[in-house]
Structures are given as C-alpha cells and as structure tokens.
C-alpha cells in the first residue's frame, strides 16, 4: 500500500515516523510545486495521502466526494483513493484537535475562546470549538477587526489557541500575546510541537493553566488517517504510546549542577549509550569567543560571560534529541529558564561537595565552595525535573538518568 504526504516544504516532517508506528505500509514525503498538484492527484500512484501547507484547499476540487468534517471545515488533509479510482477528501485534523482538547480535560462548553490566526488550522480549531459548545469564538488576525493592537477587548477570554506559526522552530521564544492580559484564561493550546513548549505554553504552564502542544493533534490526526488508509480501526491507546515515544526521542537531556559535578564525563557517556550528539554550552562559548573561560571572565567580567552563555544555550537548547552539558551558573539567570525548559528534560547532577574540584573554574575560586553550593542548590532543585546523584560509577549514574528520564 502506497501512502504519503504532499505539501511544499516537508523536510522536517514527523509523519513518516508516526505512520511507520501505525501500520505496515509505505509512507513517502512527496514535495510538490503548486503546478504539479493537479497532475499528481489525477495520475499519481497512491492509495492514500495526507495533505499539508499550502494545499489543503487546493486538493478539494480533485475530490469526487468530501466527508462531512471536510465539508464543514472547508479543507482536506486526508485523501483516499476509492476502488473506482475517485478521490474521497477527509479532514482528520478535526479528530486531532479534538484529541488535543479532550486529553487535557479542558471544558469548552459555555466558554469564550480566542483563536490566533485565520489560516487553515484556525478553521479546524473553530469548527471543533463551535461543536463543543463554545459561547463565543473570536479570531485574532493581523489584519482583522480583532487584532493584536486591541486584544484588551477580549481580556475575558477563557480559552486561547495559537493557530499561527509564531514561536515555531527556529524562531523559538516568540509569542504573539502576553498571557497576563488574560486574567480569566483557563486553558491554552498551541498547534506547534517544535519546540515542545512555545513561549506561550511556558507562560501557561507557569500560571498553572491547562495547556497542550500540537503533538497530540499531529499523532491523533495521523491515527485516524491511517485507519482510513488501512480500512480498519486502531486502538486509541496507540496515540498516547506514540506521543510518549516521540517525546522521549526528541527531548534534549540537559545536565546542570555544580562546577566539577561530572556533567562533561556523564554527558559523554550518556551520549554514547543513547547514540545521541553531545553539545557542551561552555565549549560553544569558548569556540565563539576564541579564548578560554577564565580569559573571558578576565576580559569581560562575569556579566560578559553570562551574556555569551545565554546566547549559546538558546542556540543549542532549541535543537532536539541532544545531550546538553551546561555550565554550573546557568541557573543563576532568569533569562535562561525559557531555553532550558522549552525542549529539554533538565537533570540536576548532584555530587557530594567534598568530591567537587575548584581548579580552573573562575566562580568557584572567587567564592568558597560551601557558600557557592548553599546558594546554588535551591536553584538547581527548582530548575530540574529530575535529580540524580553522581557519587558512584559513571555507568551507575548514566543508567539512573536513562531510567528516570525515559520512564
Ligand atoms: P496557514 O494557513 O499558513 O495560517 C497561519 C495563519 O497564521 C495565517 O493565516 C496568519 O493569520 C497567521 N500568521 C502567519 N504568520 C504570522 C505572523 N508572523 N504573525 C502573526 N500571525 C501570523 O497555516 P496553518 O495550516 O493554519 O497552520 C498554522 C500553524 O498550525 C502552523 O504552525 C502549523 O504547523 C500548525 N499546525 C499543526 C498541526 C498539528 O497537527 N499539530 C496541524 C495543522 C497545523 P492572519 O493573517 O489572520 O494574522
């Protein structure tokens, strides 16, 4: 069975991986230029297709029939070739967004929702929200009557959905709105899944709101599309399993801890065992500065070093699937929180104080080690999702990290 994804730019797609976990069929990435789409749909050899930007509307005219969801939304993301050769157009993004909402337990009925963006995904989101009984749905568009300059009109919004690409890799850290403008907000959804937590979702998480990224939507829409392709139902539990697997594979493991706690050694061993690249924040700083860390401290002071450190961290941590070793002072700067949290599981590598060296480390030489440990330990604890003691062998520590992070 030959299936695939058509769109214009497809290099970063997770879809082949997801479909490989959903069934035993070929799933290819098929990049097409606009003038090629019609010809491909008429003559291409395929059993089923997914459709992405910018062709979700284009393909509709080639479908002999549309499912009710595709008709209601006005776009098609799944095409099935029927036995008579004609094409059936469906929209499983609908099922995907419904899953994303339901998985969090968010209550939509009677609520006021803001949808950022007026493109194809926004149409799907609005259809689902309306069908779940939202009291009012307002589209915020750069050029519309409701836009980013008069958001104050909608300070009573309870649900906010980002259906724009703003905040998506590689432009991590951008957000169209400041959530503090929405004191009644209960739940925030972002259709973006890279990074795992956009700036908008980090704001939501810190406020203790319900939130979810777009990975659930992506996997759940693929599961329904796969059911259409294979002509059989698949267990719902597959969706959560695949999400967890993709999260495990794409999250970075970021090691923090006191200078000399073993981040480099453990990082190297962990990278080797998991077959992942190792990125060392200090190494990147040194490579970019063209001199050693003590020399940077001597020339630019700690402030100059911290600016360099933030820049290096932000560049490294927005990537996926890395082992990252960070400098001991990374937790001292609030601006490092977002890059640390957006795509990484942060592990505090805790080592007994009497085992920590002090040589060659500017900060630990200028402040007594006990004092530095006393100041930093609460910061490491607050920043880390996982704490692992590194007082035994390298292998024991590595195995413990893998067990705790991958569980
Ligand atoms: P689209 O048709 O290109 O629409 C995106 C909309 O976002 C535009 O219509 C525009 O609305 C707004 N926008 C674009 N650039 C902007 C900017 N720089 N500043 C502010 N607003 C901007 O794309 P789409 O298909 O709707 O997809 C939107 C996002 O959802 C993408 O990030 C896509 O990857 C994601 N998505 C995820 C899934 C999933 O399964 N998780 C599924 C579909 C889509 P205005 O012109 O009205 O401002």
Image: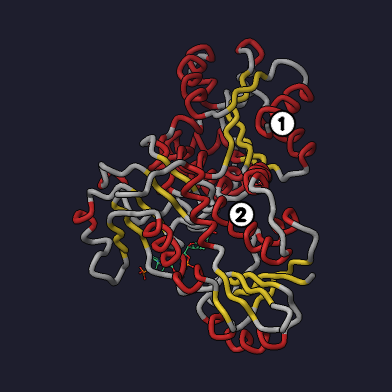
Which residue carries the number 2 mark?
Answer: 219
Seen at 41% across and 43% down, the residue is 106
Q: Give the label on residue 175, or none.
A: none
CA gap between label 1 and label 2 equals 25 Å
Name the front one of labels 1 and 2. 2
Left/right of residue 299 with respect to residue 52 in the rendered view: left
Secondary element at image label 2: helix
For ligand 1, give the image quadrant: bottom left
> Percent from the top left, x then y, of residue 146?
25, 65
Q: Position of residue 111 (x, y in %)?
A: 30, 49
Between 15 and 377, which is closer to the camera in this rendering? 15
- Secondary structure state at the residue bearing disc 1: helix
Q: Give the crowd class for mark 1: few <14, some 14-19, many >=20 residues within 10 Å.
A: some
Label 2 CA crowd tier, 10 Å (few <14, some 14–19, many 20+): many
The answer to whether residue 349 is above or below residue 274 is: above
On the image, numbered disc 1 is attached to which residue? 402
């Amino acid at each position: 069975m030959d299936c695939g994804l058509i769109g214009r730019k497809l290099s970063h797609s997770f879809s082949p991986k997801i479909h490989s976990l959903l069934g035993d069929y070929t799933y290819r990435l098929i990049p097409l230029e606009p003038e090629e789409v019609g010809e491909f749909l008429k003559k291409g050899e395929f059993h089923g297709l997914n459709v992405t930007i910018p062709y979700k509307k284009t393909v509709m005219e080639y479908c002999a029939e549309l499912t009710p969801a595709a008709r209601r939304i006005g776009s098609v993301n799944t095409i099935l070739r029927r036995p008579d050769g004609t094409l059936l157009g469906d929209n499983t993004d609908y099922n995907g967004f419904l899953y994303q909402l339901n998985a969090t337990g968010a209550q939509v009925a009677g609520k006021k929702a803001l949808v950022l963006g007026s493109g194809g995904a926004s149409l799907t989101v609005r259809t689902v929200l309306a069908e779940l009984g939202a009291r009012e749905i307002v589209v915020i568009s750069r050029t519309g009557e409701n836009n980013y300059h008069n958001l104050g009109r909608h300070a009573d919004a309870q649900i906010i959905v980002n259906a724009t690409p703003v905040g998506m890799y590689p432009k991590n850290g951008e957000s169209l709105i400041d959530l503090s403008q929405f004191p009644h907000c209960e739940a925030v959804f972002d259709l973006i899944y890279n990074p795992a937590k956009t700036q908008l979702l980090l704001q939501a998480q810190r406020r203790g709101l319900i939130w979810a990224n777009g990975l659930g939507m992506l996997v759940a829409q693929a599961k329904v599309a796969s059911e259409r392709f294979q002509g059989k139902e698949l267990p719902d539990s597959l969706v959560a399993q695949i999400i967890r697997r993709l999260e495990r594979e794409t999250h970075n493991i970021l090691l923090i801890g006191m200078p000399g706690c073993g981040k480099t050694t453990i990082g190297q061993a962990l990278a080797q065992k998991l077959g992942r690249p190792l990125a060392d924040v200090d190494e990147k700083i040194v490579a970019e500065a063209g001199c050693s860390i003590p020399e940077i401290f001597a020339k630019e002071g700690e402030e100059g070093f911290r600016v360099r450190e933030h820049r290096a961290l932000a560049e490294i941590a927005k990537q996926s699937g890395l082992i990252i070793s960070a400098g001991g002072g990374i937790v001292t700067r609030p601006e490092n929180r977002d890059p640390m949290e957006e795509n990484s599981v942060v592990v505090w590598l805790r080592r007994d104080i009497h085992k920590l060296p002090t040589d060659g480390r500017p900060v630990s030489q200028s402040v007594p080690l006990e004092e530095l440990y006393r100041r930093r330990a609460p910061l490491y604890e607050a920043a880390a999702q996982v704490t692992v003691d590194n007082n035994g062998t390298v292998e024991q520590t590595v195995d413990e990290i893998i067990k705790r992070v991958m569980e």
